[in-house]
Amino acid sequence: MFKNKIFKAAVISAIIGLLLILAVIVTGSAYPDVFFTVGTLTGLILVFISNGLLLVSWLGSIGKDVKDKNYLSAFLTAFMLLVLVIVLLRKQ
């Protein structure tokens, strides 16, 4: 899973997004400032994109495990994904 290009792109996107948000916090920018508006919007979009890429990476990992007939790993990954979705939906 860690050698997957989609997973690497997700991690890089999340790191850049979090660094942008951290830069906004460290500089103490507030709403009328352009850096606040652009930095927070771009950072949140990058983190959101990384979540989608992680989901795609997980689904690809499940497909690869099924293709390689590694059913236990595929089941555990799908189970973790299902538990994560249920926990996130129950909080709403």
Image (tube, rainbow, N blue to C red):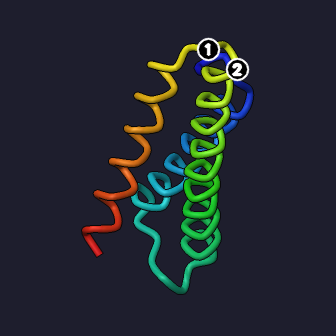
Q: Residue at x 67, y 33 (%)?
A: 60
The N terminus is located in which quarter? Answer: top right
Of helix, strand and loop, which one carries label 2?
A: helix
Badge 1 amino acid? Lys
Q: Mark 1 sits on what residue?
A: 69
Badge 2 amino acid? Lys
User: What x and y, as percent, mark residue 54?
Assistant: 58, 42
Classify 31 as above or below 63: below
Are dots 2 and 1 in contact, CB under 8 Å?
yes
The C terminus is located in which quarter? Answer: bottom left
Q: Residue at x 60, y 70 (%)?
A: 41
Q: Residue at x 28, y 57 (%)?
A: 87
Q: Which mark is residue 67?
A: 2
Q: Residue at x 63, y 76 (%)?
A: 34
Classify mark 2: residues with Cα within 10 Å, few (<14), some (14-19) or many (20+).
Answer: few
Q: Which is more toward the observer, 4 or 13?
A: 4
Number of callouts in the render? Answer: 2
Tell me where residue 57 sits by quadrant. Answer: top right
Q: Is residue 57 left or right of residue 51?
A: right
Q: Residue furthest bottom?
A: 32
Q: Which is more toward the observer, 7 or 64?
A: 64
Q: Is residue 90 left or right of residue 51?
A: left
